[in-house]
Amino acid sequence: SNDPRVSPIPSPRMFKEYFQYKGISFPRLIYSEQGLREVENKFQVRDDDVFNVTYQKSGTVWMLEILSLIHSNGDPSRCRTVPNWDRGPWYETVLGLQTARSNQPPRLISSHLPIQLFAKSFFQSKAKVLYTVRNPKDVFVSLYHFAQIFRPYKEPGQLDQFLEQFLEGDVPFGSWFDHVKGWMGLRGHENFFWISYEELQQDLRGSVERICRFLGKQLDAQAMDGVVENASFQAMKQNKMSNFSLAPRFLLDQTHSSFLRKGIAGDWKNQLTTAQSENFDRVYREQMQGLELSFPWDEL
Ligand code: A3P
């Protein structure tokens, strides 16, 4: 309705509506064509920028927390006083772009953009990208639950049908396969580092050491403890600056599920049928064949 007394939230039509930008779907509620054009063509990347890049649901906020904590030498005070979306804004969102532009350097910036839509100025800079990948079956399961609580997204409907859409890349940010193939094309470049969610799970401390080496940052043992403790799933779930409990209700409704939902590797085994998993494997093989990439989940 147009009744101005109702509420100051966006028009109901904007909820769950997607638009296409260069063949990729984006939810209208928090993205705009103009914002995406600005990011791609006008955003000025600085040499000291650090980008936290992922396909959605691959461990973005986890890496964001790790990078925030490394920056503060393991001291959690900033993580406990500033919401994660201000510490490492998603610069392709309308609000995130403003925050990214106004944050003090060195900036931490998060992004789910596929490489072809990323800020062009990055490719002439010395800025660093950390790319986190996750078993796509777990990405899918996590997204299936997330789409039910994140109001800019369409309801996922039946799992089987949503799986078809995911495998075809008919979801926001497009195909997981294209995203990973695109970004992993940068491996070997000195400004590019990649790691998997599964490695973070297996050995968080060792992973933080590798990340520090890439960033050229040295942490003593106490600082390292601070990072590892405060980036744990439990610590993040308890931190209201990291668990999205401060997110406006019109964006996220955590009454039935949480952003920080299970935080494990391999939940797909509880959620996909054998037929669904085999179908997934078939598409995975088709899409990834011939690539000299090996991931922790390949042996599973
Ligand atoms: P689940 O839905 O499988 O629990 P993103 O940040 O890219 O949206 O990814 C969210 C996923 O990362 C969720 O997965 C969430 O629980 C998981 N996650 C976030 N922080 C984590 C942590 N500290 N440890 C393990 N998993 C974490």
Image (cartoon, grey):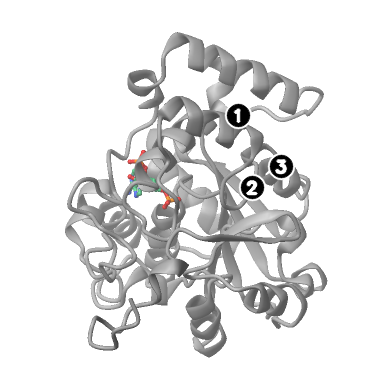
For the residue marked with disc 1, what is the amino acid? Phe
Q: Is mark 2 within 8 Å of ligand 1?
A: no
Give the mark nearer the N terminus: 1 vs 2.
2
C-beta proximity under 8 Å, tags 2 and 3: yes
Name the residue tied to disc 2: 174
Name the residue tied to disc 1: 295
Which one is closest to the eye, mark 2 or mark 3? 2
Q: Indicate the secondary structure of the residue bearing disc 3.
A: helix
Name the residue tied to disc 3: 178
Image: 197 above or below 137: below
User: In the current view of this chain or complex, which residue is farthest to the top?
Assistant: 274
- Give neighbour class at mark 2: few <14, some 14-19, many 20+ (Cα, 10 Å): many
Q: Is mark 1 within 8 Å of ligand 1?
A: no
- Residue 259: image location, x then y, percent: 31, 51
For the residue marked with disc 3, what is the amino acid? Asp
C-beta proximity under 8 Å, tags 1 and 2: no
| Real-space Cα separation, disc 1 to disc 2, in angstroms | 21 Å
| Real-space Cα separation, disc 2 to disc 3, in angstroms | 8 Å
Residue at (40, 57) in percent of width and height = 61
Image: 129 above or below 277: below
- Give neighbour class at mark 3: few <14, some 14-19, many 20+ (Cα, 10 Å): some
